[in-house]
């Protein structure tokens, strides 16, 4: 891979396949992404301009880990395991949760959702233990199936 800075334009990444096909990705200063594909022996490349969201989707397809992002929710699906979908939900701790632990709330037992991380005052807590007590201002990261996340939002967070 070759990386080139293009003054006042952006950054270009070039890859050449063993067959001589070339792919160039240019991250423009505007935030858009241009994708060029030049097949071996072709005179002109194919070009498309992508938004960062579109580029993320193409990238996730190419890596086999499809991401679907909707507000504070992310759904991950894998090309190798087509029936597996993992939903990741990010949300602030609600007043009804403050002063209670993950265990007190019975989050996993009641909903099937697992709290995988917690952000507290700019500090990350990965895999918080069940005795972790929620504080005002905490942000939680939870994983589960889409329906489990909905049940958790309704029963634990008090969201409709």
Image (spheres, rainbow, N blue to C red):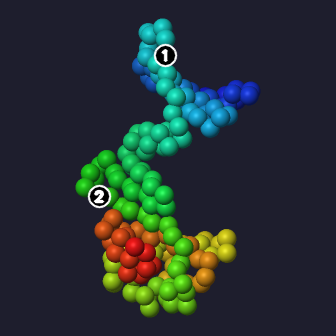
**Secondary structure beneath disc 1?**
loop
Taking the spot 53% from the left edge, 37% from the top edge, the residue there is 51
Residue 112 location (% of width, % of height) = 33, 76
Residue under label 2: 84
Whether 99 is drawn above or below 157: the answer is below
Whether 144 is drawn above or below 8: the answer is below
Residue 50 location (% of width, % of height) = 51, 33
Q: Is residue 141 visible?
A: yes
- Which quadrant holds the N terminus? top right
The disc label shown at residue 71, or none: none
Residues packed near mark 1 inside 10 Å, few (<14), some (14 to 19) or many (20 plus) = some
First in residue order: circle 2 vs circle 1: 1
Between 149 and 23, the one lying in front of the other is 149
Image quadrant of residue 151? Answer: bottom left
Whether 71 is drawn above or below 159: the answer is above
Residues packed near mark 2 inside 10 Å, few (<14), some (14 to 19) or many (20 plus) = few
The disc label shown at residue 45, or none: 1
**Secondary structure beneath disc 2?**
strand
| Image side of residue 89 versus residue 118, left or right | left
Whether 21 is drawn above or below 89: the answer is above
Residue 157 location (% of width, % of height) = 45, 79
**Residue farthest right in this picture:** 7
Image quadrant of residue 159? Answer: bottom left
């Amino acid at each position: 891979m070759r990386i080139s800075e293009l003054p006042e334009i952006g950054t270009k990444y070039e890859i050449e396949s063993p067959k001589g096909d070339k792919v160039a990705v240019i991250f423009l200063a505007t935030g858009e992404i241009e994708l060029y594909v030049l097949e071996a022996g072709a005179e002109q490349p194919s070009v498309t301009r992508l938004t960062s969201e579109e580029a993320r989707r193409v990238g996730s397809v190419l890596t086999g880990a499809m991401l679907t992002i909707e507000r504070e929710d992310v759904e991950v699906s894998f090309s190798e395991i087509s029936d597996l979908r993992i939903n990741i939900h990010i949300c602030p701790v609600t007043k009804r949760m403050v002063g209670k632990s993950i265990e007190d709330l019975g989050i996993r037992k009641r909903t099937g959702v697992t709290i995988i991380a917690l952000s507290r005052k700019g500090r990350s807590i990965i895999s918080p233990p069940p005795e972790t007590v929620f504080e005002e201002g905490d942000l939680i990261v939870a994983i589960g199936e889409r329906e489990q996340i909905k049940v958790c939002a309704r029963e634990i967070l008090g969201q409709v």
